[in-house]
Amino acid sequence: MTKIAPSILAADFARLKEEIEEVDKGGAEYIHIDVMDGHFVPNITIGPLIVEAVRPHTEKVLDVHLMIENPDQYIETFAKAGADIISVHVEACPHLHRTIELIKQSGKKAGVVLNPATPVQSILPILKEVDLVLFMTVNPGFGGQAFIPEVMDKVKELRSIIDEKAYHAEIEIDGGVNEKTARLCVEAGADVLVAGSAIYSQKDRARAIEAIRG
Ligand code: DX5
Ligand code: ZN
């Protein structure tokens, strides 16, 4: 079954506890948390304090997507704040293998993220080590952008490599996922779908989650 990861970037931050409880009860497997630093991406969002504040209100997997420069410096802080998966961008990590090791040493699951223009080849040397590969289907920085369908070719490419080598990494898709584009992601081989606006724009979150799951 496809896992669904609502992105709280599209939630009402003044009532974040309720917004998280609704998607938790609504059947979400992961809660996706978008951390942006205003340098790696042109927006500033959530820091470790919010991860810590959210942690007592859900037992679901906290899927922390770091869109920041120098992620090594903050891994321990996000781990202590209660993240379950910590994902870093290939484009922000000149020493990617070391960064992945740091995440694993912190006792958390390690993910790598590829921007739409970054090739699958860039992660092949560390693929065996990672628990999650996240494909961006928008240019990171904002919610509510249009899905870039060309990324599906990369998803298919990685799906066959993971299957052939029997690696354990999950494939996650993030950006512009809705009821329609979700079908393309699943066909291409995705395991986890992130959705922000498609879930939080709907009053009935449980229904929105199931519609995306298909
Ligand atoms: C974009 C973020 C996404 C975003 C998705 O930089 O990484 O997680 O919240 O939002 P939607 O689903 O609205 O495209
Ligand atoms: Zn994200």
Image (tube, rainbow, N blue to C red):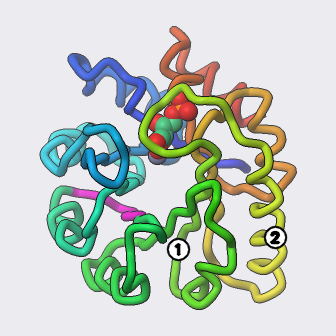
Above or below: residue 157 compared with residue 17: below
Q: CA distance from mark 2 to mark 1?
A: 17 Å
Of the 4 image quadrants, the one containing the C terminus is top right
Tell me where residue 162 sits by quadrant.
Answer: bottom right
Does 134 sit left or right of 141 as displayed? right
Amino acid at the residue labelled 1: Asp
Q: Which of these two is toward me, 34 or 90?
A: 90
Q: Which residues are magenta?
A: 82-87
Q: Residue at x 83, y 59 (%)?
A: 153
Question: Dot 2 corresponds to which residue?
Answer: 157
The numbered dot on residue 131 is: 1
Residue 6 visible here? no
Give the vertical position of 52 relative to 145 (above or below).
below
Disc 2 residue type?
Glu
Q: Which residue is depicted at the point 53% across and 74% down?
A: 131
Label 2: element kind:
helix
Q: Which type of secondary structure does the marked residue at label 1 adopt?
A: loop
Given residues 153 and 209, the one toward you in this image is 153
Q: Quadrant of residue 92?
A: bottom left
**Category of crowding for the residue at label 2, using alpha-carbon neighbours closer than 10 angstroms: few (below 14), some (14–19), many (at least 20):** some
The residue lying toward the viewer, choosing from 14 and 72, is: 72
Q: Residue 199 location in percent, x, y?
A: 55, 23
